Amino acid sequence: MTVPTPPPTVTPDPPARTLRAVRPALRVHGFSTVLRISALLIIAVLIAVLLALFALDIATGDFQIPLGRVLDVLTGGGSRAQRFVIMDSRLPRALTAVVVGAALGLAGAITQSILHNPLASPDILGITTGASCGAVAVMVGTGGSATGVAAALGVPAAALAGGLLTAIVIYLLAWGRTTTGDSGVMGFRLVLIGIGVNAALLSVVSWQLTRATLSDAAHAQLWLTGSLDRSDWSTLVPAAIGLALTLAVAAVSARTLAALRFGTDITRVLGVRIQTQQAILLAAAVIAAALATAAAGPLGFVGLAAPQIARRLLRTPGEPIIASTLVGAIAVVGADLISRTIFPIDVPVGVITAGIGGPFLLYLLVRTNRKATL
């Protein structure tokens, strides 16, 4: 008698996993992007902090004005005295602080992103010192009291020319063979050459001061520490134009800037003309940094620290453009507020930014050295 063979056991297939997007996507016609809710919330907080500091900066001074009255004056109300204090004195200074800080933060984010080096900021590379050379040449040549067209165009134009010329010299000196054997600019080499050029330009600035009259040298020396004391609408407009131009270039080149953060091989595979795009973005960063320097003097470490702080806040692999711009504006407005409230006398803003940015530079150097030795 044959025993029937039991039917084989069929193991059911495991249920198919439903793929779920980690982050929600936003699609509008041919444009698509990934929404990072946490990043948007942090940017919203940064905007709120900037607005709060901006209002406090306007309200604080020898003549205290309540915050509610500040908003009233900005919307067309208030007394004649309050309108004079806010609209003619404090508003141009506060707006200059916002624009200068935003421009330096943006310039730092661009240079650090495309050169892959957290030390590649306009002040470390010598761009702001080159702009200072041009600006000081005009200041000591016009007696430190230029007005009209000379005040509106002379210092910004000279600072822009000095910054661009310095950037061209550094770029040409840093040109050579990369690790892949191609011709181009390496970030580490450019930083080292920029540090050397910065030291040479500082000696040129000192030489200019020794040849100036006492009053001209005193005016230029105050400006060289980074000061907002002489901020007005004529100094604000060129810096705002430089910031708007650089923001436009960064917005148009957003995808290219993201690709440049990868290695050379990946960037080339993505179809990016590396040297051309680097030159365009560096030129935009130089314009923003030079015109910001013309408006308030060389504010040290803002372009260095703002992108790194923004990167840590958003936890992004590269330096975020918008967040770096906001952090730079917050840093300068906050420094201006500290300089006029904590100390018994007005302290130049550049002293505050240097006092805070110096330890941050040491932190970056120690962190970079630890990574290199691991």
Image (cartoon, rainbow, N blue to C red):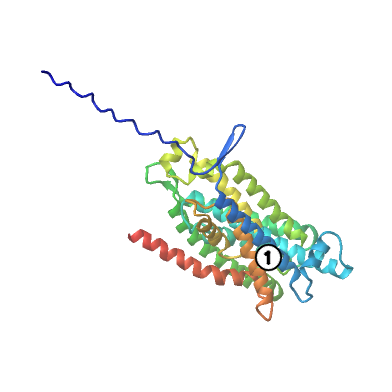
Rendered location of residue 171, percent (x, y): 51, 50
Residue at left offset 69%, top offset 64% = 52
Decide: few, some or many residues near mark 1? Use Cα within 10 Å; few <14, some 14-19, many ≥20.
many
**Picture quarter containing residue 223?**
bottom right
User: For the C terminus, which image quadrant?
Assistant: bottom left
Element on which disc 1 rests: helix
Please tell me which residue lies in front, 33 or 225. Answer: 33
In the image as oriented, which residue stretches furthest toward the top?
1
The residue carrying mark 1 is 53
The type of residue carrying mark 1 is Leu
Residue at left offset 55%, top offset 70% = 356
Judge whether 277 appears above or below 238 on screen.
above
Rendered location of residue 320, percent (x, y): 55, 51
Please tell me which residue lies in front, 104 or 255. Answer: 255
Please tell me which residue lies in front, 48 or 373. Answer: 48
Position of 116 with respect to 138 (left or right) is: left
User: For the N terminus, which image quadrant?
Assistant: top left
Position of 90 with respect to 298 (left or right) is: right
Judge whether 325 appears above or below 356 on screen.
above
In the image as oriented, which residue stretches furthest toward the left?
1
In the image as oriented, which residue stretches furthest toward the bottom?
344
Residue 294, visible in the rendered structure = no
